[in-house]
Image: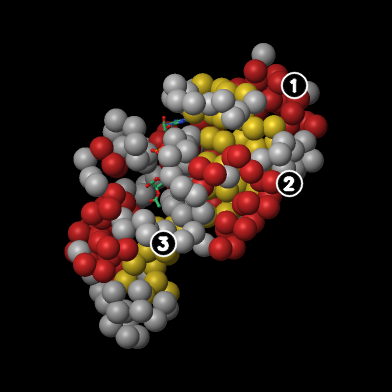
Amino acid sequence: MAIETLVEWMKNSNSTVVLTGAGMSTESGIPDFRSQSGWWQNIDPRSVASVESLQHHYELFREFYQMRIEALTNIEPHIGHQILADWEKRGLVALIATQNVDQLHHKAGSEEVAELHGNIVTIRCTSCVKPHTIEHFLNNSVCTYCTGKLRPNVVLFGESLPQEAWNLSFNEIQNADLVIVIGTSLEVYPVNQLPRMARGKLVYINLDVSGSTRQFDLVLEGSAGEVLTKIDQKLALF
Ligand code: OAD
């Protein structure tokens, strides 16, 4: 019944925005952050993913992102990513605003993607900002122009979000008839403020819906791949 309701809303929506978090990628084999098998179970994020760690504990910082980058080897988008990409092509999704840094939405073929937390597949120099290759970073090279430290284009704790991605997401969510939030604990500021900017219908798809979901008009419990497949099958019947 809930899925039929969502399909109805999707059909009637002039603009639908999808907001994704790490739970969108777990079925591709990438751990999330706060589940039992998540990155932050055994690692304090401030010690590896912060401005402080970049400036004062560069080796720890670099090793952590090396591990994260290497964990993306041979990782492919799953059926859920593909369905979202297909919905964009069919005019059913206007924008994916994502906290994910793995670029799996792009890899699945989505074009309108706002990377709210940047990504870990492109690299820049911390000093002169010039781009470098992943190999430079993985080989522990310094910047070839100014010998500065290299880093992924990811947002660290203590940094602002990319202005363009934020503004786009904020405006599109505010103007959307429907916002579908998938696979995020909504624990991290400021992205966790975005759903409350929505003036249209608000839907939550997550494995764990035990937290407060009062702000949502509809809650669908289950894995992203599974739930999106069910929605897609129902859409086909309309
Ligand atoms: P979290 O790890 O906080 O939350 C992931 C959510 O997805 C949890 O509620 C899981 O229950 C759910 N989940 C896991 N697998 C799922 C699946 N297959 N289908 C549906 N739901 C699933 O990750 P985020 O909310 O994305 O920031 O975390 C936000 C930010 O915290 C990240 O972008 C990262 C981290 O620190 C930075 O690195 C800047």
Q: State the residue in front, 146 or 190.
A: 190
Pointer 2: what residue?
175
Helix, strand or loop under label 1: helix
Mark 1 or 2: in front is: 2
Three-letter amino acid code of the residue under disc 3: Glu
Point out residue 94 in the picture as x, y percentages from the top left corner. 70, 47
Indicate the secondary structure of the residue bearing disc 2.
helix
Q: For this rendering, which residue is in front, 121 or 187?
A: 187
**As shown in the figure, which amino acid type bears the numbered disc 2?**
Asn
Q: How is the image coloured?
A: secondary structure
**x, y percent for residue 224:** 51, 30
Q: Of label 1 and label 2, which has the lower sequence position? A: 2
Please tell me which residue is depicted at 60% across the width and 28% down the height of the picture.
216
Instruction: Please say if 192 is above or below 60.
Output: above
Q: Which residue is mark 1?
A: 237
- Picture residue at 51% right of the left edge, 21% below the top: 221
Ligand 1's quadrant is top left
Q: Earlier in the sequence, mark 2 or mark 3?
A: 3
**Which quarter of the rendering shows the N terminus?**
top right
Q: Which mark is residue 159?
A: 3
Q: CA distance from mark 1 to mark 2?
A: 28 Å
Query: Any mark on residue 3, and which?
Result: none
